[in-house]
Amino acid sequence: MVIQRRTVAQFEDLISNGIASRDETIDTYIGPIRDLYITPPSEVMKGIHDNIVYLSQLLSMQNAGTFNPEDLDAFVYNENVVRWTGSPSYTVVTFSRLLPPSADITVPLNFPLATKTDPKTGQVVNFRTIETKTMYGPLTVSPSSYYNVQTQRYEIDVAAVSVVAGGNTMVGAYTITQFRRSFPDFEYVTNKSATTTGRGLETNSDLAIRYQTRITGNQEATPTGLKAFALNLMSNIEDSHVVYGADPNLERQSEDAGASDVWIKSTAPATDTYDTYYRGVRELVPLPKQPLISVTAVSSGPTYYTEGVDYEVVTGEGIYAYSNRGRDGIRFLIGGAAPALNAPLRIVYQYNAMINIVTALYKQPVYLVMGSDVLYRWAQKKSIVVEAELKVGSGNPTTILGSVRDKVLTYINSLKLGMDVEEFDIDAQVASVSGVDNWVYVTLAVKGGTGVGDILIGPMDYAYLEAADLIISLVS
């Protein structure tokens, strides 16, 4: 909703109508009631309302040119946008002399130069050198290397910049001709080409446009932008991790130019049925929709086959593992039952549709970054086991045990990608439950392992604790 400005008179009318609705005999137009109770509050309300309208316009970036620059600077800083303070004009100036150098002549850094006074404006633009350059004597370099046949002078080029920033520092060719300090080794100086265009302090309007551009999708070209895109896309994407450049976890850079992988912590199971044919023992049957979560059934006509006995499920292989370019599927085992060669084969399976959804949305023109190959991949859970003995000091043991279970499950299953599972952190969660006296680990390990110790989690993985894998025994 657009917030409209209200005048003092409008507020006065509102207050007057309010008073009149209670007592019509009170004069709200002339006299002390208006002077004391209507006009002063209306003026205060007008000031408050102006600030509200101003804030509304700031949030919507309407009329950016009218904002207080400090207010706009503070607002756009929320997106790490900072007002450009301006830029100077750059050029190359040529120092020259009529005679060849008899010894080394050095043009120092920050040597001052200037234009002649502009007869129309009276303006002088000051410049300074931004590098040290030496015209070497005959013992080092032949003087002919500095000689310009057209000007019949010995010349050396040096980079220079205007002393102040701003658009009014741009000057044309052959205008920087004044030495601001004596330099007897050179008789002449000039710029053979116009300077670059300097830029003044960024205006509110330009800053507002840059801020709006930043938040409308072009950040996807950066690692943080890719991460933000995934996290801001859907509420059920819990975390993301971007792999790019020389990261050793990026395995496909030799195959795909501009490769970047975005691993997301999110699952959206969907079921699909794939009808194909039997290709032989140990031949991979890749499924059309990736990445694979699980296989529900494999059959050929009326015959059903058993996972682990007749076939194995293949996931996470190759440089495109856990993406929609993967080749997850099944492979029939030697010694197990199998259909006849080329017989019909039906596979019912579940796949993670979230990867396909995110990929499709990213490929929309408003988000797609040309020249890049962004691949969304499914972060994998690392199942862990926690077994411990709990001693209750006071309170109902059953209630306290339930609270401890909730604390541990909630804490571990809320960990982000790459966050390790540490004994100390779990201890802190347990200790926060009133009534706990002691907590001793029996097992803290990756599922299938033994022992007690911190569990390291890779950047594309996350820790996960099933309720059945949290075993807590009450001890006295």
Image (cartoon, rainbow, N blue to C red):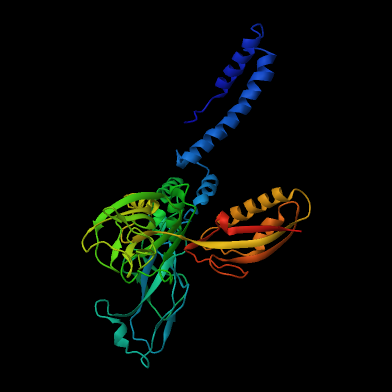
Give above or below for 361 relative to 321: above
The x, y position of residue 130, in whole percent, is 44, 72
Q: Residue furthest bottom?
A: 139
Left or right position of 290 against 165? left
The x, y position of residue 148, in whole percent, is 27, 79
Could one spot residue 124 in this view of the protein? no
Residue located 70% across and 49% down the image? 398
Could one spot residue 263 in this view of the protein? yes
Question: Which image quadrant is residue 443 in?
Answer: bottom right
Residue located 38% across and 70% down the image? 251
The x, y position of residue 188, in whole percent, is 37, 74
Question: Which image quadrant is residue 306 in?
Answer: bottom left
Q: Nearer the viewer, residue 395 or 88?
A: 395
Give above or below for 188 relative to 382: below
Q: Nearer the viewer, residue 68 or 467?
A: 467
The x, y position of residue 406, in whole percent, is 63, 51
Q: Quadrant of the C terminus?
A: bottom right
Q: Nearer the viewer, residue 87 or 302?
A: 302
